[in-house]
Amino acid sequence: MNKEKKRKDPVIILLDIIIVALIFVTLYVGQSYVFYKIRMNEETFAADPDKMAFELQRGDYAGLIQGKYMNEFNGNVETPGYHSLADYVEAAFAYKVYDAKGYTQEANEQKAIMDEARVKMEELTIFADKVDKWLN
Amino acid sequence: MKCRYCGSNLGLEDAVCPYCGKVNKKAAKYLAEKNKYLNEFEKTKTDVKEKSKTAGRIGRLSVIGVMLILILVMKFSVSRYSDVEYRINKREDIIASEVNKNRDTIAETVKEMEKNREYVALSCYMLNYRLRSNEQYDDYFRVFTAAVSYKTIYEDIISIVTGFEGYDNKTTKDWCYDAAIYISDWNSYVAGGFWNDSPDSPMHAGEHGAFLADAKKDAQDMVQVYFNLTDEQAESMWTMDKEALGELLYESCKDLYPKEAADE
């Protein structure tokens, strides 16, 4: 039995080629779109775990504190460990002032914050130890 | 089938009986019907082929159309988002609408932070919601300036103590001089000397006035403790020349926070 060879419509072949080409164009434009969309979302003061880890690695404790506040204001609760460390640093700095100036009640309040933060920061206590070393 | 004349076997398409030679009328009818159905089948087959070809083309054209629209929309968005000014304005619009939506909560939070003397938090909050450029908070202008100045001095001290070099390799001396600028400028920009604030300005009245006084006192305590200044030095720092104050701070702290210790 003779099998009739199917001939594909040349218009459809052309359209298929156009679709394949457009897939590449879509991917190219799409990645630029996603890149700028992410940048748009990144232009906030909120700090994600990567940003806070980077700040800590650079030793930017002031940036860590600002990041904590910005996250709190923007409802970002992704980084509780870093927030506890930031609380600790803030309280430790304040404690030194109150202690030296003889403001006992305020110093005790800061000490309580430090103790609570130390429990919550888990593996980041190594940085709290560093801060203690710098301040004493 | 059987020949109606001689009774011998006939094929469906035999026009005459091969045995008796008589005409087979049923075959003619059968062939006519067969041809009719064959024609109809061919016609339907051609129709289906034609329709499926058209449907294939329409389908592909639709896909191309959707992809082109998608590409155009994304291309348009990319051209907008790649414009820094557009992104900044867009973010400002988002923040402004958020501030409008949460007007009461934000006002209450600012009041609470001012009352609790949360200088660093207030400075961050103000920055987050761009409150310094918000007309609703005109009376808070000096309060915000105090919070920003306090936070800057505070951050300079943290950097000195921890040995942080910033993102542009700053030295302890650089941080000391930076703090000195904010301390020396306090009376001008926070107390309002530069702006010629009238004594009864709402920016210095009531809780704002108390906040400004406390911010100055707390900043003084902080600088005195971290730079180990005498009471006299701490009190006079507000009126000192920037250069002289920067030098005093640096001389006071360079041995207190040696860089090597911070780097360990």
Image (cartoon, rainbow, N blue to C red):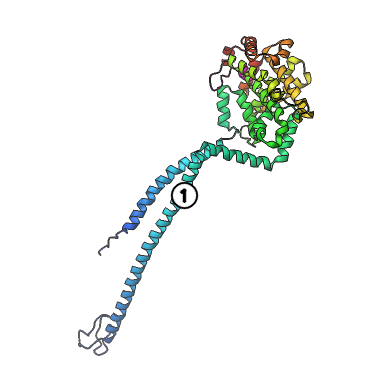
| Residue B148 sits in quarter | top right
- Along the line of sight, which residue is nearer the eye, B79 or A64? B79
The quadrant in which the N terminus of chain B is found is bottom left
- Along the line of sight, which residue is nearer the eye, B231 or A124? B231
**In this view, B177 is above or below B147:** above
Q: Is residue B58 visible?
A: yes
* Magenta residue span: B158-170
Residue under label 1, please give it: B70
What is the magenta segment's predominant secondary structure?
loop
- Along the line of sight, which residue is nearer the eye, B201 or B253? B201
Residue at the image position 72 percent from the left and 35 percent from the top: B109
Q: Which residue is outermost to the bottom?
A: B5
The x, y position of residue A126, in whole percent, is 61, 21
The quadrant in which the C terminus of chain B is found is top right
Residue at the image position 59 percent from the left and 23 percent from the top: A60
The x, y position of residue B226, in whole percent, is 68, 15
**Which residue type carries mark 1?**
Leu
Q: Which residue is outermost to the right?
A: B206
- Along the line of sight, which residue is nearer the eye, A35 or A108? A35
Q: How many marks?
A: 1
**In this view, A89 is above or below A15:** above
Q: Is residue A118 visible?
A: no
Label 1: how many Cα within 10 Å (few below 14, some 14–19, many 20+)? some
